[in-house]
Image (cartoon, rainbow, N blue to C red):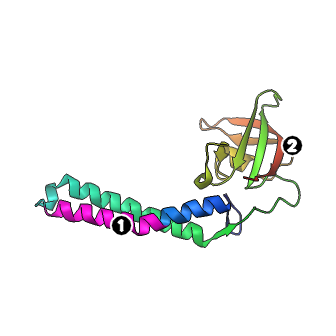
Amino acid sequence: MTQTSENVTWLTQEAYNQLRAELEYLSGPARTEIAAKIAAAREEGDLRENGGYHAAKEEQGKQELRVRQLTQLLENAKVGEAPASADGAVAPGMVVTIAFDGDEDDTMTFLLASREYASSEIETYSPQSPLGSGVIGHKVGEDAEYELPNGRKASVTILKAEPYSG
């Protein structure tokens, strides 16, 4: 899954189906379950000192936030492959291989995409992360710089960038 500047989220069919199923569960059965928890806790008496009630209400709030996030994400989703960068530059939706500090032996490969599509198959970096925003727009062979959490700068060389194929 990737975010593009047009505010479109590109999803593989698998990712779309997974997010759609999560939304349907949270909008249906999960709402019923949390309503039952709240009702049961309400029956226990004084709501000011009822930890179960407050925990259930907090859980409900988190669940409703996730429903809103998923709804918005799926409204802006397009299923298929993200278009490849016209000029060969690193863009969201690409698998990028970099070398740290110009050391060809110290490499890392990752998917530059939204964290919503993180999987165990390949490490995922958000385009908004320091590394992600540092490599966007650079071409193979170019050096890119990004800021580390401690405020120092780090440099990487783009070794490879190709569209993610799933």
Give yes or no for contact between labels 2 and 1 (Cβ–Cβ under 8 Å).
no
- The residue at the point 73 percent across, 55 percent down is 93
Name the residue beneath numbered marker 2: 142
Secondary structure under badge 1?
helix
- The residue at the point 69 percent across, 44 percent down is 131
Q: Residue furthest bottom?
A: 75
Instruction: Give x and y (percent) for residue 140.
Output: 87, 45
- The residue at the point 42 percent across, 69 percent down is 27
Name the residue beneath numbered marker 1: 31
Indicate whether residue 72 is drawn in magenta. Answer: no
Which numbered tag is attached to residue 18? none
Q: Which of 101 and 81 lies nearest the eye of the viewer? A: 81
Q: Which residues are magenta?
A: 24-43
- Residue 99 lies, with reference to residue 48, above or below; the image says above
Locate the N terminus and report the quarter of the image it occupies: bottom right
* CA neighbours of label 2 inside 10 A, class few (<14), some (14 to 19), many (20+): few
* CA neighbours of label 1 inside 10 A, class few (<14), some (14 to 19), many (20+): some
Instruction: Give x and y (percent) for residue 95.
Output: 76, 47
Indicate whether residue 28 is drawn in magenta. Answer: yes
Q: Is residue 161 visible?
A: yes
